[in-house]
Amino acid sequence: MGQGQQETVPTSLAGAVGEEIGAFLAPVDAELDRHYPGDPGTRQPVHTVYVPADVFAADTIRTWGDRALAALDEHAPDAASFAACLGLPDELAEPVYTRVRAKLEREPVEDLRVDFEDGYGPRPDAEEDAAAARAARLIAEAFARGAAAPSMGIRMKCMEAAVRERGIRTLDVFLTGLAQAGGLPDGLVLTLPKVTYPEQVTAMVRLLEAFEKARGLEPGRLGFEIQIETSQAILAADGTATVARMIRAAEGRATGLHYGTFDYSACLGVSAAHQASDHPVADHAKAVMQVAAAGTGVRVSDGSTNVLPVGPTEQVHDAWRLHYGLTRRALARAYYQGWDMHPGHLPTRYAAVFAFYREGFARAAERLSRYAHRAGGDVMDEPATAKALSGYLLRGLDCGALDLDEVTRATGLSRAAVEAFAAPRRGDLTASAN
């Protein structure tokens, strides 16, 4: 065989066979692209803070940060005392404590929802109208002056008959106020609670479509989170996973599934003393949510704890240890977001998140570097693992647990190259390190 000539290997199938199979699977290919687009690649907040609409104010975010810092000053005034409370290893004590304080000063809240549901309750229509208009004004002003959380919005009342009209009106007043104040901000997030049937999700889609049409907005501009708080949202009467059908019913508008710890536990008859995010019924619900959402671009959020870090130092430390442990448990199970109900939860939210990413940073960076540069090593990583490693580093960067210069030094990769590993094309889990 002459130089440059390629050896011909024998085959048995005619070329038409591949074409026929391609044509047969074309609808499946389209279904995969439409329903499983993968993670959107945008920043996911590490938590969501819920603030009742009647107490939400222009300085709420800064007030939460200041109260969290005051709690540290009173109950853990230095790295050693904070680490002793939470059981942080010596090598993490100072880096975590320093980053927690810096985060509380710079960006104490990553995601805020003004609550018109359980945290607000039933009010006279005129009062709720005024509160919804006020929330719109304050959120618009916060985004305009750069004082907003990265994402903000409202939790409306649900689509059940008793409160449906009120929920629709509140959403209309709020969105109209934003539109009139300069337009809908990029960080806008809406939450639909107590969803039981896919048809309620479809109703929310139709409602948002109507608003977009009325205001001349681009179709699909508005998305929303689905809150999972009832057993029927997990398992339908016919045995199917309702939450999977809810994602389909959202027609691409669903951005998240949020687990409601206490409503869901109560729905299953769990006594109040045992209602917690680590109860077996919670683990089952979140596992179903996680599988249903995988690959769809819809993100899963854990719920909250109602044990508040208030009172004497010993009591605060007990609450901190509980919250820290629940947050670390959720992170290990790939629930990268949760709810925080009190400013005193912020120190342990960020301590848990920062410790999670910092303690695994060196190993993750080494493995990704070896994979990217084909350097071998003691673990044979595959493209899917490289995707997980890069996603881990990116989440650490987004929340402030890691710095870009240390990631670049450890991996030899730019952020763009790390992102390329985190979001490979479907069917091609090989990404180049540029």
Image (spheres, grey):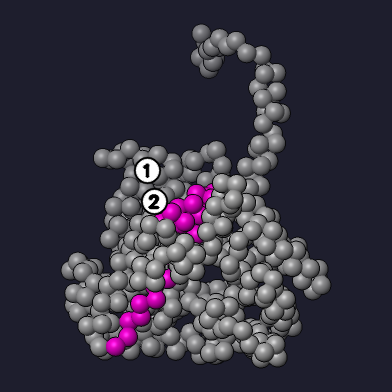
- What's the residue at 56%, 49% (across, down)? 241
Residue 296 position in % (x across, y down): 58, 51
Which amino acid is tagged 2? Leu
Disc assigned to residue 371:
1
Disc assigned to residue 389:
2
Judged from the image, the secondary structure of the residue bearing numbered disc 2 is helix
**Dot 1: within a 10 Å radius of its alpha carbon, few (fewer than 14), some, or many (20 or more) residues?**
many
Q: Nearer the viewer, residue 310 or 177?
A: 310
Residue 95 position in % (x across, y down): 27, 72
Q: Magenta stretch?
A: 283-311
Residue 3 position in % (x across, y down): 51, 14
- What's the residue at 50%, 59% (across, down)? 300
Residue 281, by quadrant, is bottom left
| Image position of 79 with respect to 46: above or below | below
Q: Is residue 288 magenta?
A: yes
- What's the residue at 57%, 89% (across, down)? 54
In the rendered view, does 190 fall on the left or right side of 93?
right
